[in-house]
Amino acid sequence: MEVSVVNENKNDVVYSFVKDTLLDNFLKLAKVNVLTGEFEFMKYDAVMREEGYESISSIYEYIERQVADGLILSEYVGEYLKFANPEYVKKRVFSGDRRIIQSYKRKVHGGYMWITFGIIGPEGCCEENPWVVFYWREADSDTTTMVDALSTLSAIYHKILKINLTTDRFQVIKVSEYERKHFANRLTRITEWWREFAEGGHVHEEDLTVFREFTDAERLKKVFTEDSVSAQSCRYRRLVGDSYRWAQMELVPSIEYEPDNQILILYIKDIHDAYLRDLRNRQALLDGYHRDALTRLFNRHKYNEDLKALSKDGEGHLTCMYADVNGLHELNNHLGHEKGDDMLCSVADTLKRFFPEETVYRIGGDEFVMLSTKLSKETVEHIMVEVRRELLQDNYEISVGVEDGQCEQNAYKIVGAAELAMREDKERYYRENGRDRRRRVLNEELEKTLEAKKYAERFLSVISDKYAGVYFVDLRKDTLQHIYIPEYFLELLEQADYSYSRAMRLYIDRYVKEEYQAGLLQMLDYEELAKCLSTEAQGDLSLVYQKVDGKYVSLRILEMEKYTEEKYETIWIFSEKVFQSDDPIQLYSGRKLSYEETVNR
């Protein structure tokens, strides 16, 4: 195509203005032979000048040198280096590509400037006439906005294509180097890409059907003909390295879309981690709906769903074991609900251990059901003999009924028969003095509990006179377990949200004389305290301080025999002391007491 300049008069002001303005828009202009790489700058703005490049004779070497010298921001290097490849440039130029352009950030005087790089070739550029113009200009705001947007999309999506369903063609916006080499640079049709991608093992075999159905071009043409359709998406697993990862493909109509020219944008992003996290969350919610909170067995919701499904299928063999715990009500009344919970958990754990492959449910307060499509009635009855024997060692007893049959007889009838057998077993248990025996066992347990409580109360009454407080303190977690704790310190703990160090600071501020506060505060530096305890020969530290009420208190801190990186327990013993010395501060404050001194004082 010939281009002529009307009224080409170099004295014409408008002509000169246009010529100078266009030239000013470019920072660099180079005449380039794409076959040999020979080039000559026609304009070289001082802003873009590079020192030591004068001896470079090839434009391809020139671009490589820019990258090697760190002039191009790293995230844009890959795309810019394509233009250092003669084969890539020749293919683009000689194919008649009229839009060869790339935007990037380049280092300029310590900062970065947005640059638009491009190639302009004359009409009919070919190997006989291989001269083109390489240009560099400062990118306009629209370009930088677009590149920023594409950079953001590129960070989210690992593949972006512009595809035309009508012509079966595609244009690459972003792909991995692997896909560029094996698909984009070799194929021209998007349907070929999809077919070879699936057949080449890049899609998990379990997702092949979904992938092929989604990428069926004829289906997509029909779908996107409907006005109401704005997007289509598909989730599948694709091969990444040596493993498969979940990905999502999305097709969205382009702004150029027309019913007879169906242009779409294809996005693919990795959703593996987010999808698995979502699956775990959904499973946790489902477990919360299907699991009994106390025993972690399946609950009545799951039992009803499974029984309905078994009845609906109506095929195969089913064995049901129906169990009821004897004496739960009495146990709760005598020893409290905590003991009752212990019994239920023990029964649940035992059933699950003896039926590891079967489905076990807690369907009521003290009722348990096991459903099996594999075990016979005789096998289950034999197992339940062992279950009862093991539970009896803990003085727990259950009533049991077992029944089996074919599901076509109705699974509900099989379960009903097992429940009826359990009721008969329970009547037999109580008829044979089971109630009296259970009451006797409960009374024995109650006596043991009361005896232990009596000894505990007696122990606390003895040490309360001798000690002002005895605590197990975990230096790793800043928590405590107390053997004896005064009422006022319990209130301080509640105010400190049960942080031992914060409660101690409140105690020091309110109850300890000012001149002794620093020494106590040093003990709350847990890291230093741990070092001191580990280096002391006896593994303990002691100090004496005075409270605001005038009383002296001895604090002894001992290291536990066993500790780990996660747990480091110490014992803090506070005891009130009476000294005969006229100067107890000088005698005891600030030095470690021996074990004998601590006890005797």
Image: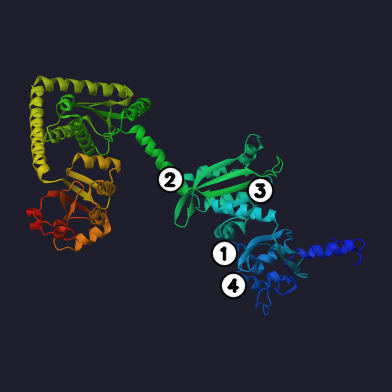
Q: CA distance from mark 1 to mark 3?
A: 35 Å
Viewer can see residue 124: no
Q: Residues within 10 Å of mark 4 (few under 14, many from 20)?
A: few
- The residue indicated by pointer 3 is 168
Looking at the picture, how far across and down is residue 508, in whole percent?
25, 49
Q: For the point 22% across and 37% down, which residue is it?
A: 349
Residue labelled with disc 4: 69
Which mark is on residue 276? Answer: 2
Say left or right for 563 vs 225.
Answer: left
Vertical position of residue 98 compared to residue 71: above or below = above
The kind of residue on which mark 1 rests is Ser
**Is label 1 or label 3 in front?**
1
| Mark nearer the N terminus (3 vs 4) | 4
Q: Earlier in the sequence, mark 4 or mark 1?
A: 4
State which tag comes first along the sequence, 2 or 1: 1
Cα separation between marks 3 and 2: 34 Å
SS at mark 2? helix
Considering every residue shown, the one lying at the far bottom of the view is 55
Q: Amino acid at mark 2?
A: Leu
Q: Nearer the viewer, mark 3 or mark 2?
A: 2
Q: Are marks 1 and 3 in contact (CB under 8 Å)?
A: no
Contact (CB < 8 A) between labels 4 and 1?
Answer: no
Give the camera-side residue of 259 and 492: 492
Of callouts 3 and 2, the N-terminal one: 3
Q: Is residue 469 left or right of residue 61?
A: left
Cα–Cα span, label 4 and label 1: 11 Å
Among the 4 quarters of the image, the one containing residue 50: bottom right
Question: What residue is disc 1 on?
Answer: 74
